[in-house]
């Protein structure tokens, strides 16, 4: 019996929330109720929040004031969410170009929290959240976690490749907080050598987390390693939440078979937090419709571009944001009883593992943060590998490109791949997308299992 969980959930969490002045617990209660509302009531709430957002953006954000005037859009005349289609989509390039004009002038800087994407499309993006949106994002995430069984106070293992998300706070206070409240361990999957994977297996056996939250490719590679090495003594969680990368049916089947539990796939991005995730029915992913308006363009039964409006970020509104993923809207009602709309991803972030000359296996997703996103002057990039001692870097030059860019690039290659890695740079006008509409940050023709001997 876990005696710490009820203390963390019912005593520590309320105290921490009160001290932080956070409204997340109140928002979470609202979300737990509204998810079971009928479709029409949820849509009415969306429309109410959309109207408020649009009026605010028109009055306080110079960028939207200009865009609305240019196309003759009057937020006061909005009668349905479909009217939003008269506005142009917002692209990543638009945000990069007009970021300062998109920030709401009536928000004090102290209430704006800076954030940045990892650049999974090779083009990192800086943006701001207002403090209340930070709280509603947390509430939405906790609700989605609960669909997979994970709740406040449960022990969790996070198999993640983004080192920025992995805390390095080793103070006594941090250790106490981790033991009694956060109760999560982070396993850095940016480098998955055989030694590292063996360490993961040992750590998981020792810590015994109830749930995993993982990069899809990372937990798939771990499952393959366990299966192909015929390892019998390893930890099995109650369920696994996968995110950050495209999860194929074959990957899901192998992960569920090895770990003897269900996989709950999730779709999200740093700009909006959780967008959609699976409920226990596993019949598509429920959209967080109370916080986001998700459009599919063109509206059809086939794969369409995903366009998102964040209904609650008033600090820097993202209205009709084209996220560069493709998805399919699912009609009908879900047997779980939730009135939230559903969707599936038809093309997500596709990032291959990369191999170093000394046989280390590196996450392509992790490289989006620590390779390209930290080098100024690169608009887009793609790494292609056909042999373990050579990589090809395809680059689209950005405005800040200079000799210093090249110096930093070489430094990053040496840092992550070692001095034995050879590389060449091809400058291109653009990097083509796949048929699914998504472009791959890394393409590796090598099987990582061959290097985990």
Image (cartoon, rainbow, N blue to C red):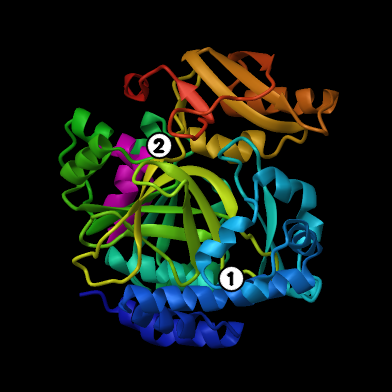
Magenta-colored span: 198-223
Q: Secondary structure at mark 1?
A: helix
Q: Quadrant of the N terminus?
A: bottom left
Task: Give above or below for 418 relative to 215.
Answer: above
Q: How many marks?
A: 2
Residue 196: which numbered mark, if any? 2
Task: Give above or below for 354 relative to 333.
Answer: above
Tell me residue 450's x, y (percent): 33, 19
The answer to whether 404 appears left or right of 270 in the picture is right
Q: Quadrant of the C terminus?
A: top left
Who is closer to the viewer here, 206 or 300?
300
Query: What's the residue at 59%, 15% (across, down)?
Result: 392
Task: Give above or below for 252 relative to 23.
Answer: above
Q: Residues within 10 Å of mark 2 (few under 14, many from 20)?
A: some
Q: Residues within 10 Å of mark 1 (few under 14, many from 20)?
A: some
Mark closer to the observer (2, 1): 1
The answer to whether 424 appears left or right of 215 in the picture is right
Who is closer to the viewer here, 219 or 453?
219
Query: What's the residue at 52%, 12% (across, down)?
Result: 389
Q: Quadrant of residue 429?
A: top right
Query: Which residue is identified by label 1?
Result: 134
Tell me residue 342's x, y (percent): 33, 59
Tell me residue 46's x, y (percent): 49, 73
Q: Quadrant of residue 131?
A: bottom right
Q: CA distance from mark 2 to mark 1?
A: 34 Å
Q: Secondary structure at mark 2?
A: helix
């Amino acid at each position: 019996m876990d005696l710490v969980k009820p203390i963390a959930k019912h005593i520590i969490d309320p105290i921490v929330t009160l001290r932080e002045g956070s409204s997340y617990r109140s928002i979470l209660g609202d979300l737990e109720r509204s998810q079971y509302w009928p479709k029409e009531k949820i849509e009415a709430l969306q429309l109410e929040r959309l109207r408020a957002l649009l009026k605010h953006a028109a009055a306080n954000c110079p960028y939207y004031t200009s865009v609305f005037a240019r196309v003759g859009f009057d937020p006061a005349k909005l009668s349905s969410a479909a009217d939003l289609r008269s506005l142009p989509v917002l692209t990543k390039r638009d945000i990069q170009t007009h970021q300062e004009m998109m920030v709401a002038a009536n928000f004090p800087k102290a209430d704006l929290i800076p954030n940045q994407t990892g650049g999974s499309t090779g083009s990192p993006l800086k943006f701001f959240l207002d403090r209340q949106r930070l709280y509603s994002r947390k509430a939405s995430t906790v609700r989605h976690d609960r669909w997979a069984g994970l709740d406040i106070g449960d022990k969790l293992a996070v198999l993640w490749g983004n080192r920025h998300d992995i805390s390095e706070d080793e103070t006594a206070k941090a250790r106490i907080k981790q033991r009694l409240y956060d109760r999560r361990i982070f396993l850095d999957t940016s480098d998955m050598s055989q030694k590292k994977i063996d360490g993961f297996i040992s750590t998981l056996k020792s810590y015994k987390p109830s749930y995993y939250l993982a990069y899809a490719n990372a937990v798939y590679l771990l499952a393959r390693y366990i299966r192909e090495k015929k390892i019998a003594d390893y930890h099995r969680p109650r369920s696994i939440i996968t995110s950050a990368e495209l999860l194929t049916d074959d990957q899901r089947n192998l992960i569920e078979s090895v770990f003897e539990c269900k996989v709950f796939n999730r779709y999200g991005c740093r700009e909006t937090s959780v967008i959609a995730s699976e409920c226990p029915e596993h019949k598509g992913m429920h959209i967080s419709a109370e916080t986001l308006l998700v459009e599919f363009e063109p509206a059809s039964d086939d794969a369409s571009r995903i366009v998102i409006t964040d209904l609650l970020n008033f600090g820097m509104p993202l209205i009709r944001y084209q996220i560069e993923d493709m998805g399919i809207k699912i009609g009908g009602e879900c047997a779980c009883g939730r009135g939230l709309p559903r969707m599936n991803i038809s093309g997500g972030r596709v990032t291959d593992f990369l191999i170093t000359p000394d046989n280390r296996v590196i996450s392509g997703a992790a490289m989006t943060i620590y390779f390209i996103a930290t080098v100024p002057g690169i608009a887009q990039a793609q790494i292609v590998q056909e042999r373990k001692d050579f990589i090809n870097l395809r680059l689209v030059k950005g405005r800040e490109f200079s000799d210093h860019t090249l110096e930093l690039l070489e430094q990053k290659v040496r840092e992550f791949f070692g001095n034995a890695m050879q590389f060449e740079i091809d400058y291109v006008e653009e990097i083509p997308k796949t048929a699914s509409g998504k472009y791959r940050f890394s393409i590796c023709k090598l099987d990582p299992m061959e290097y985990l001997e």
